[in-house]
């Protein structure tokens, strides 16, 4: 699915920023991204999410190619899906990112704070925020 904006605290439209991608990155719209050696890379597991991709490519980016992203601050709630059943996940829990960088898992210990889930079924819709990547902290 990807991480798509559900709400922003002040109602603004987050601006696009353009940052260099690493050569291995094949961005998908809504993909969680981290910084690795100063370049964008797919975020997975417990990685700290800094940005969310606003573009989609069929092939990997050229090393250093700038792509559009939005900053994943704590003032934005993103909607995505949960790979697996989030029956053990409660609102307020922090969960990890799936290996595709496009959804979360029910595994504890990540950077995605769950603020809502619609069910305990496999593939449930969840809403999360990434507090550690708050723009005010940079």
Image (cartoon, rainbow, N blue to C red):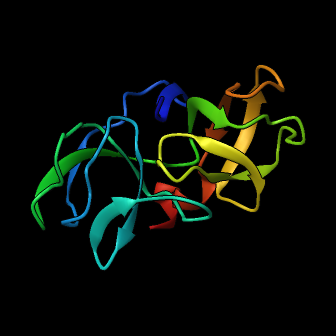
Residue 42 placed where, x, y %?
A: 39, 57
Query: Looking at the picture, does residue 63 appear above or below residue 30?
Result: below
In the rendered view, does 116 fall on the left or right side of 56?
A: right
Q: Residue at x 58, y 47 (%)?
A: 74
Q: Position of residue 58 (x, y in %)?
A: 18, 40
- Compared across the picture, whether 26 is left or right of 14 comes to left
| Rendered view: 66 above or below 76 | below
Residue at the spot 55% in from the left edge and 65% down from the top edge? 47
Quadrant assignment, res 62: bottom left
Q: Residue pushed farthest top?
A: 118
Q: How far across and how far down the image is residue 92, in percent?
A: 82, 44
Q: Is residue 137 left or right of residue 38?
A: right
**Relative height, residue 91 to residue 124 (above, below):** below
Q: How many marks?
A: 0
Q: Is residue 138 left or right of residue 97?
A: left
The answer to which quarter of the image holds residue 118 is top right
Q: For the view shown, which residue lies furthest in the bottom direction? A: 37
Q: Residue at x 21, y 61 (%)?
A: 21
Q: Which quadrant is home to the C terminus?
A: bottom left
Q: What residue sits 26% from the left and 57% below the top?
A: 25
Give 71 or 33, whichever is nearer the viewer: 33
How far across and how far down the image is residue 100, in percent? 47, 48
70, 94: nearer the viewer: 94
Q: Is residue 125 above or below residue 72?
A: above
């Amino acid at each position: 699915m990807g991480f798509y904006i559900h709400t922003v605290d002040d109602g603004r439209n987050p601006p696009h920023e353009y940052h260099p991608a690493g050569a291995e990155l094949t961005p998908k719209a809504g993909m969680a991204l981290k910084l690795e050696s100063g370049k964008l890379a797919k975020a997975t597991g417990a990685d700290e999410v800094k940005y969310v991709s606003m573009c989609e490519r069929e092939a990997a980016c050229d090393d250093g190619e700038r792509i559009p992203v939005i900053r994943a601050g704590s003032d934005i709630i993103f909607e995505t899906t949960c790979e697996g059943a989030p029956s053990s996940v409660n609102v307020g829990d922090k969960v990890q990112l799936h290996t595709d960088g496009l959804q979360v898992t029910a595994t504890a210990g990540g950077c995605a704070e769950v603020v809502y889930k619609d069910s305990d079924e496999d593939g449930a819709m969840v809403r999360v925020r990434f507090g550690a990547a708050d723009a005010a902290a940079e």
